[in-house]
Image (cartoon, rainbow, N blue to C red):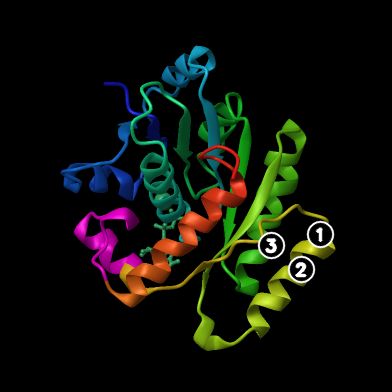
Amino acid sequence: MQAAVHVVSIDPQGSTIWWANRLSDLPFDFSQEHQTPENLAILKDSGAQVHVVANQKGGVGKTTVTLNLAAVVADVLKGASTLRHVFIDTPGSLQDENLLLEALKYAHDVIVPMPPEPLAFDPTARTIEQVIQPTGIPYRVLINNWDPRDGQVDLEDTRAYIDAQGWPSLKSVIRRYKVHSRASAEGKVVTQYEENKPSFKAREDFYRLAIELRYGGAA
Ligand SMILES: Nc1ncnc2c1ncn2[C@@H]1O[C@H](COP(=O)(O)OP(=O)(O)O)[C@@H](O)[C@H]1O
Ligand SMILES: [Mg+2]
């Protein structure tokens, strides 16, 4: 049966390559296409919505967001028999900009993960202003990896920066939980986390995000 959700990595250094070998029980289909990005052209006729997750800064959470959002949407759409959503995880480097541009040819929208750290601001601005905005594709910035124990200041500063740039952003925030980094070492996605409080909160963030994005259908 055709899965409702497909994840594509076009990151040559993709930790998703590593993930794919580990995930025994993926809730979505997965393929690695950095060597054959022209395969993405198939997406054009698939009728699925194509979401590109992009930021040319490494380590901002592109892979984490791609896999976990895809897992949650797959969970909401389980039972659907046609492909509905494709998520493309992209490289976090300037050298591979051609791969990102190829993915953007097929994108319906773009999610730009960004941590609440000033060091990430300039590289994120470059990706948005030089690569995403010129395409005219709708995009939204997603704050990822905010640690609530650090207090609200980082979050507020980051929101103020995003608003000052005039960038559209998502209300949902993905908080920092150790379980995310631990899970990536174990090859697990958020729908497969153990039942305990931090896992519940970590999972909740991605369900809330999926609802805000309306990827599982209107609320
Ligand atoms: N919300 C989060 N909570 C905890 N760890 C996170 C979170 N987001 C990302 N990480 C960790 O940060 C590192 C970089 O994330 P990753 O998704 O690989 O970034 P990218 O794909 O942009 O390079 C990984 O070790 C990942 O587990
Ligand atoms: Mg990555």
**Residue drawn at 51 percent across, 48 percent down:** 93
- Between the residue at mark 2 and the residue at mark 3, the CA separation in whole angstroms equals 11 Å
Image coordinates of residue 95 in percent, x first then y, are: 52, 42
User: Neighbour class for label 1 at 10 Å: few (<14), some, many (≥20)?
Assistant: few
Q: Which residue is mark 3?
A: 122
In the picture, residue 166 is in which quadrant? Answer: bottom right
Q: Is disc 1 in contact with disc 2, using a CB cutoff of under 8 Å?
A: yes
Whether the residue under disc 3 has CB within 8 Å of ligand 1:
no
Q: Quarter of the image containing the C terminus?
A: top right
Q: Which residue is mark 1?
A: 165
**Residue drawn at 77 percent across, 54 percent down:** 167
Q: Is residue 55 visible?
A: no
Residue type at tag 2:
Tyr
**Residue drawn at 46 percent across, 61 percent down:** 59
In the picture, residue 44 is in which quadrant? Answer: top right
Question: Eyeballing the image, is 53 above or below 145?
Answer: above
Question: Eyeballing the image, is 41 above or below 65?
Answer: above
Image coordinates of residue 39 in percent, x first then y, are: 42, 18
Q: Earlier in the sequence, mark 3 or mark 1?
A: 3
- Between the residue at mark 1 and the residue at mark 2, the CA separation in whole angstroms equals 6 Å
Residue 131 as seen in the image, left or right of residue 204 = right
**Mark 2 or mark 3, whichever is nearer to me:** 2
Q: Earlier in the sequence, mark 2 or mark 3?
A: 3
**Mark 3 or mark 1, whichever is nearer to me:** 1
Q: Which residue is mark 2?
A: 161
Q: Is disc 2 in contact with disc 3, using a CB cutoff of under 8 Å?
A: no
Question: Eyeballing the image, is 134 above or below 14?
Answer: above
Range of the magenta residues?
180-195
Residue type at tag 1:
Gln
